[in-house]
Image: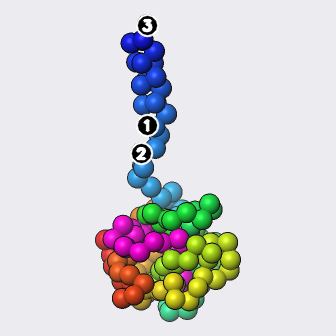
Amino acid sequence: MKKAVLLLAISFLLTLFSGCVQKEVLPEEDEMIVEVDISEISDPVYRLDISYFLDDELMGGMAVSNTDTTEYKGPAYFAFLPENFPENGNLENFSFKITVSGDKNGINELFSSAELMVSTEACEQFKVEYGKLYHYKVTGSFEKGFTLEKN
């Protein structure tokens, strides 16, 4: 009887936690996704912001964080749809930069503490292609600065 209960409990736990494995994110045909790996950042990260540009003109931004204000471990995924860009706009010179925040108060507030908020340089411009996933990573620290590179 004890073995049956133990086997039942183990199978329940395996079923419960089998959904916890991170699955690969795949874009729909009408979206482009930028994946940002932050696993090489040694400082605590609480929020990531992406500012995106067309022909070096700011188009907008998005942010990602945990709503419970715990440390964000990443990766971060930023999905872009046609409505994120001007209608009939030229999507050949797209670029973005990432702002890393180490201030947990910056999650619920509009701004983070300036000394705990550092931006990368913008990536090289590229043409937006819907249905594609672009892999990038951010490395560095708040003290030395952060670098954005294609992964």
Task: Identify residue for label 3.
Answer: 1
Residue 149 screen position, x and y as percent: 33, 79
Are the residues at dot 1 and dot 2 in contact (C-beta closer than 8 Å)? Answer: yes
Q: Amino acid at mark 2?
A: Val
Q: Amino acid at mark 3?
A: Met
For image coordinates 54% across by 72% down, the residue present is 47
**Residue 22 visible in the displayed image:** yes
- As drawn, the residue found furthest toward the bottom would be 56
- Left/right placement of residue 47 relative to residue 42 reads right
Mark 1 neighbour density, 10 Å: few (under 14) some (14–19) many (20 or more): few
In depth, the one of 75 and 33 nearer the eye is: 75
For image coordinates 42% across by 11% down, the residue present is 2
For label 1, the SS is helix
In this view, the mark in front (3 or 1): 3
**Residue 135 visible in the displayed image:** no
Distance between mark 3 and mark 1 Cα atoms = 26 Å
For image coordinates 40% across by 52% down, the residue present is 24
Task: Identify residue for label 1.
Answer: 18
For image coordinates 38% across by 81% down, the residue present is 141
Are the residues at dot 2 and dot 3 in contact (C-beta closer than 8 Å)? Answer: no
Marked residue nearer the N-terminal end (2 or 3): 3
Distance between mark 2 and mark 3 Cα atoms = 31 Å
Task: Identify residue for label 2.
Answer: 21
In depth, the one of 91 and 120 nearer the eye is: 120
- As drawn, the residue found furthest toward the top would be 1
In depth, the one of 95 and 145 nearer the eye is: 145
- As drawn, the residue found furthest toward the left would be 151
Distance between mark 1 and mark 2 Cα atoms = 6 Å
Is 15 situated above or below 51?
above
